[in-house]
């Protein structure tokens, strides 16, 4: 009994420390004109709960659109995912943290519009270049958090060390989506060669792994993913970092863009548990970026935390 | 070739140009950029000087006035004063630290565990140490009366926050002055710093110098901005318990308050801030 309790406590502690992040769960909509069926939502919820049981703590729901498509003018219409009303219950039940992500398919950079307005509505902004021009634009001067590719088909060009590494140095991470390896033989073949070239061109740096799971069957836990990607040439310590530390850095970068002024002053935060910009999903007012709390600081308090807690 | 072009060549170009075949000189169309030596900004400097040295009636009348004003504004040995103030601050901090150490030692030797007893004991037996101790209570009005009013005025908060614009408030806060603010360290690479709370007495480039209220005596602590996240609260009203909470990312805040005021901040890659999101 005692042993069991200790084991549980250890597991809890391990859980609290570990952040396991999946940055890519597709949203069942490919453009703003598409309709969302309740069935698709149901399927998505199932995927999310499966990922939760596999140990994931932070999940981003990915909405993929073409960059040249017309975006709605109303700022409230920009984000169709609406996490709070649709998945608020799920978050409360399981303790999952859900984020919204937009992936822009970039073909001809001249047709697209500025990112600043779009990025305000989403937590993470990713780019998916499908032409050489798009790749050069997104590696050099687009203000994004993630760079991803269509792993099921050929890459737009040969990836060069120089452009990819400079992009990683800028703070943009590269994403590998392992969902493509689980679908059909043709996609898997492309996936292997594409992932190898991404790993080679980035020199193992700044790689993040996402699932891209359309159904609960395509989810894998950290061990499964590590064994798959390790086979493709990424060292296993980088694999676990790719799903933990680096992926959470992407979340931090994305959250800081909207919730802070150029990463200096952040709304919210605090010394209670789970209270930084990334983990504090509910508390910060999204439209006004302020956080109202009950007052905890007083000049009459003692200066040290341990002494402060004593009555 | 149509007729108009031949006409232009024969009748117009032959009169005006050296080579009627090529109306545009090809050297002009070189696509490379030529770098020419400059005079090092000499001409522009000379022009400026010439403008200044021009005399007119107005400038002549104002000269005597201006000189008077300048003399009034000018402080004698400004540089030395500035340098001395730095030294004085450093000495103050060091003497405070020394005296607190001595004081704690005395308290330990005489087994005093009460604040009142300690202060009365020090006042009687070691007046030199007692006078050198920093007093937290002396700085509380700086927070309560000065800083809170300043920050409320800056964000234009008056009882209700319905009109407050979050993003512009963040912008203003990034340029605000934090001398006198009540800060608390929430996250840090150095675990022993976490939870320290105090009033800022000086906001230097790389440190926040806080005065911290202790159980026995008050201390001065220099907390590095690097690798630390600070939190502060702005109470909305005196009667209500609600407050606005913000945190400062020390890694991106490493500027003196003077330099920060006109600064344009830039987002950088945030790989160094991993400690912020990891629950320690």
Image (cartoon, coloured by chain):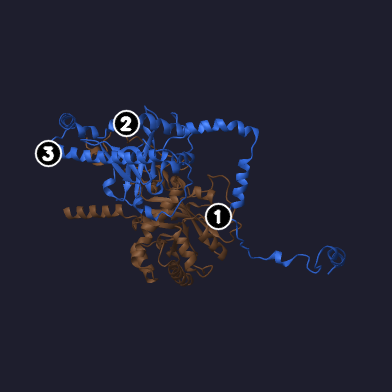
Colour in which chain A is shown? brown
Circle 1 packing at 10 Å, graded few (<14), some (14-19), many (20+), is: some
Quadrant containing the N terminus of chain B is bottom right
Q: Label 3: chain?
A: B
Residue B207: image quadrant is top left
Q: Circle 1 — which element?
A: loop
- Look at discs 3 and 2 and give the one toward the viewer: 3
Colour in which chain B is shown? blue
Residue A31 has which mark? 1
Residue B49 shown left or right of residue A162 in the figure: right
**Where is mark 3, residue-wise?**
B109
The structure residue drawn at horizontal position 76% and vertical position 65%, both measured from the top left corner, is B24
Residue farthest to the top, as pictured: B239
CA gap between label 3 and label 2 equals: 31 Å
Q: Position of residue A149 (x, y in %)?
A: 49, 64
Circle 3 packing at 10 Å, graded few (<14), some (14-19), many (20+), is: few
Q: Are marks 3 and 2 on the same chain?
A: yes
Q: Are marks 1 and 2 on the same chain?
A: no
Question: Can residue A131 be seen from the camera position used here?
Answer: no
Residue farthest to the left, as pictured: B110
Nearest the viewer among A85 and A292 is A292
Q: Is residue A302 above or below residue B48?
A: above
- Look at discs 1 and 2 and give the one toward the viewer: 2
The structure residue drawn at horizontal position 43% and vertical position 41%, both measured from the top left corner, is B258
Residue B140 has which mark? 2
């Amino acid at each position: 009994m005692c042993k069991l309790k200790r084991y549980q406590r250890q597991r809890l502690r391990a859980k609290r420390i570990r952040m396991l992040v999946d940055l890519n769960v597709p949203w069942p909509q490919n453009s703003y004109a598409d309709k969302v069926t309740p069935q698709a939502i149901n399927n998505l919820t199932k995927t999310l709960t499966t990922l939760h049981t596999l140990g994931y703590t932070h999940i981003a729901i990915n909405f993929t659109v073409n960059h040249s498509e017309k975006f709605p003018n109303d700022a409230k219409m920009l984000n169709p995912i609406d996490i709070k009303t649709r998945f608020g219950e799920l978050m409360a039940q399981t303790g999952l943290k859900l984020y919204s992500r937009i992936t822009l398919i970039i073909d001809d950079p001249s047709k697209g519009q500025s990112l600043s307005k779009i990025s305000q509505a989403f937590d993470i902004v990713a780019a998916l270049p499908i032409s050489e021009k798009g790749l050069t634009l997104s590696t050099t001067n687009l203000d994004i958090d993630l760079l991803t590719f269509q792993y099921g088909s050929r890459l737009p060009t040969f990836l060069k060390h120089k452009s990819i590494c400079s992009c990683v140095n800028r703070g943009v991470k590269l994403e590998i989506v392992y969902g493509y390896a689980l679908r059909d033989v043709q996609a898997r073949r492309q996936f292997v060669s594409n992932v190898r070239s991404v790993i080679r061109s980035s020199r193992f740096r700044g790689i993040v792994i996402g699932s891209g799971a359309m159904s609960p069957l395509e989810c894998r836990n950290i061990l499964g993913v590590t064994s798959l990607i390790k086979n493709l040439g990424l060292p296993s310590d980088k694999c676990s970092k790719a799903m933990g530390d680096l992926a959470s850095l992407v979340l931090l970068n994305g959250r800081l863009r909207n919730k802070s002024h150029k990463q200096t002053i952040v709304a919210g935060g605090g010394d209670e548990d789970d209270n930084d910009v990334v983990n504090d999903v509910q508390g910060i007012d999204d439209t006004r970026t302020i956080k109202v709390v009950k007052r905890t600081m007083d000049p009459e308090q003692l200066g040290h935390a341990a002494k402060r807690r004593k009555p | 070739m149509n007729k108009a072009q031949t006409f232009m060549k024969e009748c117009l170009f032959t009169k005006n140009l050296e080579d009627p075949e090529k109306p545009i000189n090809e050297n002009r169309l070189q696509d490379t950029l030529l770098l020419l030596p400059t005079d090092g900004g000499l001409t522009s400097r000379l022009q400026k000087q010439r403008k200044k040295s021009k005399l007119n009636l107005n400038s002549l009348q104002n000269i005597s006035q201006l000189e008077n004003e300048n003399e009034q504004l000018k402080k004698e040995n400004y540089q030395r004063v500035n340098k001395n103030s730095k030294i004085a601050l450093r000495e103050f901090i060091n003497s405070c630290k020394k005296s607190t150490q001595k004081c704690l030692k005395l308290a330990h030797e005489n087994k005093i565990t009460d604040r009142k007893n300690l202060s009365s004991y020090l006042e009687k037996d070691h007046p030199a140490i007692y006078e050198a101790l920093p007093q937290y209570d002396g700085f509380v009005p700086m927070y309560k009366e000065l800083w809170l009013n300043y920050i409320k005025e800056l964000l234009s908060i008056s009882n209700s926050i319905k009109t407050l614009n979050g993003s512009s408030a963040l912008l203003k806060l990034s340029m605000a002055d934090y001398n006198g603010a009540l800060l608390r360290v929430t996250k840090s690479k150095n675990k022993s710093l976490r939870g320290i709370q105090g009033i800022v007495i000086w906001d230097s480039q790389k440190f926040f110098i806080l005065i911290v209220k202790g159980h026995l005596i008050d201390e001065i602590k220099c907390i590095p901005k690097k690798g630390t996240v600070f939190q502060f609260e702005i109470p909305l009203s005196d009667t209500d318990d609600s407050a606005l909470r913000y945190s400062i990312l020390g890694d991106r805040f490493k500027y003196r308050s003077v330099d920060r005021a006109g600064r344009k901040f830039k987002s950088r890659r945030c790989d160094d801030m991993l400690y912020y999101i990891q629950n320690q």
